[in-house]
Amino acid sequence: MKTDARVRYTKMVIRQCFFRLIRQKSISKITVKEICELAQINRSTFYKYYADPYDLLEKLEEEAILGFTQMIDEYPQKGLRPVLITILRAICSSKDFQDLVFLQTQEDFIRRLALACFHKIQMYDPAFSSNGGMLFGCLCGAVSGLLTYWLHNGIKETPEEIADQIILLTRAIQESFTKGEKS
């Protein structure tokens, strides 16, 4: 079912106002009243779509994760590096995404993003599905740590450099697990 243009517009305004507020203060200090006043909407309109600012944040995170996993679906035959570069460039170009990372739930959000992306990548690369999920967990942890570091240090490295680091991490972890199986 298609979403009405007015609904899309209203949600966009609510989200823009939320991001404006989140750049000024923590989510625990943001009220529905503030969002509504800034967006020039009634509280009932806000509550039609979101329970509270935390619900709005959760939905924003879910949409971001869905967007990134859809990017992976667009590049299944091109290999890991082009997919990673596309995702990392999208991260660089989205101030709203970067703001999501710096919220109180940042580590959980990055971990969930890495988990969702690797789950999708696993469907295209059988090497990711070996070792009963242990390899998968290590990869997600390592990549989410690398992404968190990259974002918190001002995105100094290019998406290509980070993609190469992720691939090196992936290979090192995969080799470690392969050696462990042979021992």
Image: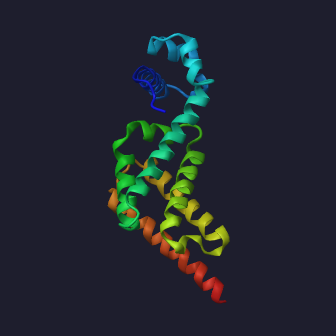
Identified at 67% across, 71% down, the residue is 132
Which residue is situated farthest in the bottom direction here?
A: 183
Q: For the C terminus, which image quadrant?
A: bottom right
**Is residue 172 shown above or below 44?**
below
The image position of residue 71, as x and y in percent, is 41, 52
Residue 26 seen anywhere in this rendered image of the structure? yes
Identified at 56% across, 60% down, the residue is 140
Identified at 55% across, 70% down, the residue is 128
Q: Nearer the viewer, residue 69 or 106?
A: 69
Q: Nearer the viewer, residue 28 or 89?
A: 89
Total marks in image: 0
The image position of residue 35, as x and y in percent, is 51, 18
**Is residue 56 shown above or below 84?**
above
The image position of residue 156, as x and y in percent, is 35, 52
Which residue is situated farthest in the front direction here?
A: 1
The image position of residue 120, as x and y in percent, is 51, 59
Q: Looking at the image, what colour scheme do you see?
A: rainbow
Residue 31 seen anywhere in this rendered image of the structure? no
Specify the quadrant of the image occupied by residue 85.
bottom left
Q: Nearer the viewer, residue 84 or 145?
A: 84
Specify the quadrant of the image occupied by residue 52.
top right
Identified at 49% across, 33% down, the residue is 1
Q: Is residue 180 left or right of residue 169?
A: right
Q: Is residue 161 left or right of residue 97?
A: left
